[in-house]
Image (cartoon, rainbow, N blue to C red):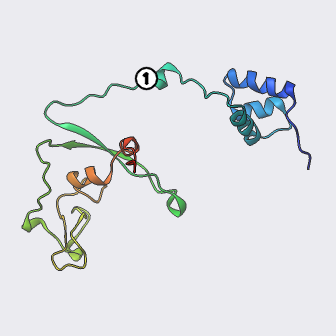
Amino acid sequence: MTVLTWSDDRVEQLKKLWEAGLSASQIAAELGNVTRNAVIGKVHRLGLSGRAKTPSSAAPRPRKVRPAQQMMRVSRPVSRGNTALAHAFEVEVEVDPIAHDNVVPMSQRLTLLELNESTCHWPVGDPSNPEFFFCGGKSLTGLPYCAHHSRIAYQPAADRRRQQPKQR
């Protein structure tokens, strides 16, 4: 196995190609006898800046909000491991802004054996307690939860990342 050292000429060529916007794979092919990962590692060690985003991808798109109702986007989490081929999809849900409380009517509460595809599977309480039940509300198409519980279960990843850990 031959270990290739980064000569000053190759480093300068790497910097020029990186600044020109070529990908690590393209730079590796251009330099020859080096892998994409070696290029990425060298770029990192040199502290080269990341690429500037194009104006169209960097600018946030304005969102339309209906005045009487809000639209909510529900995303399925990306699957990993043996479920990696599971379908990921998004659903838009009309949400009534007034319905914020989580009171489940007695007539709506279901046991495990009473659940079906059209009922909300959100568990309420401690499963070891005899008063444990499932929400039982009308579930959203293709989801196991009603609109209220879908808002809780499927929070956008960006919102979760914005919350900073508490300092000790």
SS class, disc 1: loop
Instruction: Name the residue rendered at 12%, 48% in the picture.
Output: 99
Q: Is residue 163 left or right of residue 28?
A: left
| Residue 35 % position (x, y) | 78, 41
- Image side of residue 74 versus residue 146, left or right: right
Asked if 25 appears above or below 53 in the picture, the reply is: below
Q: Amino acid at mark 1?
A: Ala
Residue under the image location 23 percent in, 73 percent down: 126
Question: Does residue 38 appear in this view?
Answer: yes
Callout 1: 10 Å neighbours few (<14), some, many (20+)? few
Above/below status of 38 relative to 115: above
Residue 162 at what x, y percent from top left? 38, 40
Q: Position of residue 91 (x, y in %)?
A: 32, 45
Asked if 3 appears above or below 140 in the picture, the reply is above
Observer-nearest of 166 and 141: 166
* Disc 1: which residue: 59
Asked whether the viewer can see residue 141, the reply is no
Tell which of 124 and 112 is nearer to you: 124
